[in-house]
Image (cartoon, rainbow, N blue to C red):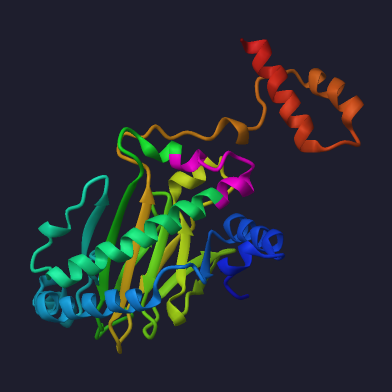
Amino acid sequence: MEIPVINFAELDGENKSKTMSLLDHACDKWGFFMVDNHGIDKELMEKVKKLINSHYEEHLKKKFYQSEMVKALSEGKTSDADWESSFFIWHKPTSNICEIPNISEELSKTMDEYVSQLHKFAETLSKLMCENLGLDQEEIMKAFSGSKGPAFGTKVAKYPECPRPELMRGLREHTDAGGIILLLQDDQVPGLEFQKDGKWFPIPPSKNNTIFINTGDQLEILSNGRYKSVVHRVMTVKHGSRLSIATFYNPAGDAIISPVPKLLYPSGYKFQDYLKLYSTTKFGNKGARLETMKKLANADSA
């Protein structure tokens, strides 16, 4: 099996319908996929990676290898800690990038430029997902907005070389709490794995600065289970230090999350009422029948 790759350049041509179908399939059956020709400046992406790698080497690497976790592992002891060196940057609704210790002006400025482009892409992707779900294009954006608009933040992580990879995870098994995750990752060092059909699926390093996307818990709830969040993890490796720049398009803290009513099944009706409708619509569209049943059930409960 190969990870679905969505070519955004195809959305403007005669292959739009096919590309939208592939995107829906990727969200529905996989929960993760790659995006190429996303419109984000690839030289800028390279610069972001270079500057973050330099920041790690200059300010974080020594501290990581002096940590108690590393000392314990050298003695063959394991813990529930993750083998990572990371920090989090908030971008929206307010930025905290200037508060990150030792961050250079160049990295701060470059990150802001990258995030500005990535945010536009995230909004475009959310609109395409809404279209595939049969919703208004702004539905995800509105649901995530709260009082100040959707939240947008980045977890910057390095997964350093590990002398005993059989004893430690870079990041333990989990699903992501938020909405849409947009990952700019290492182009050389592997380690990321997603679960599909009960088996672990290794995600290869991203060549040519493609963006790796996965869906989080809130999108699963919003879509009433249609677009599910997927369990994933990061494995450690003996050789190479993996870079991960994961940006989260999330609901605001005060956003009220629930399934979109249009995506809910009808409920609270008598089966005999369903059979009555079924008798006249058996050979018609099931979706239309369920929508009619939903309206009838809602009218009865009003």
Q: Looking at the picture, how far across and down is residue 129, in whole percent?
A: 56, 50
Q: Is residue 70 magenta?
A: no
Q: Is residue 65 left or right of residue 192?
A: left
Out of 85 and 170, give the one closest to the viewer.
Answer: 85
Residue most toward the bottom?
239
Residue 7 visible (yes or no): no
Rendered view: 198 above or below 268: below
Q: Identify the residue shown where x is 87% and y is 36%.
A: 284
Q: Quadrant of residue 159?
A: bottom left
Main structural element of the magenta stretch: helix, strand or loop? Answer: helix
Closer to the camera, 58 or 109?
Answer: 109
Q: Residue at x 68, y 58 (%)?
A: 21
Q: Is residue 302 left or right of residue 183?
A: right
Find the residue positioned furthest to the front. 13
Give the number of marks: 0
Instruction: Give the camera-side residue of 272 and 261.
Output: 261
Where residue 287 appears, as percent x and y from the top left, is 75, 37
Direction from residue 209 to residue 277 in the image, left or right: right
Between residues 281 and 193, which one lies in front from this camera angle? Answer: 281
Q: Identify the residue shown where x is 13% and y is 79%.
A: 65
> Image quarter for residue 118?
bottom left
Q: Residue at x 57, y 30 (%)?
A: 261
The reply to whether residue 62 is visible in this rendering is: yes
Q: What stretch of residues is rendered in magenta? A: 128-141
Quadrant assignment for the N terminus: bottom right
Examine the structure image and report whether residue 132 is included in the region drawn in magenta.
yes
Q: Position of residue 172 (x, y in %)?
A: 34, 64
Whole-percent x and y of residue 135? 60, 40
> Is residue 50 depicted above or below 273 in this figure?
below
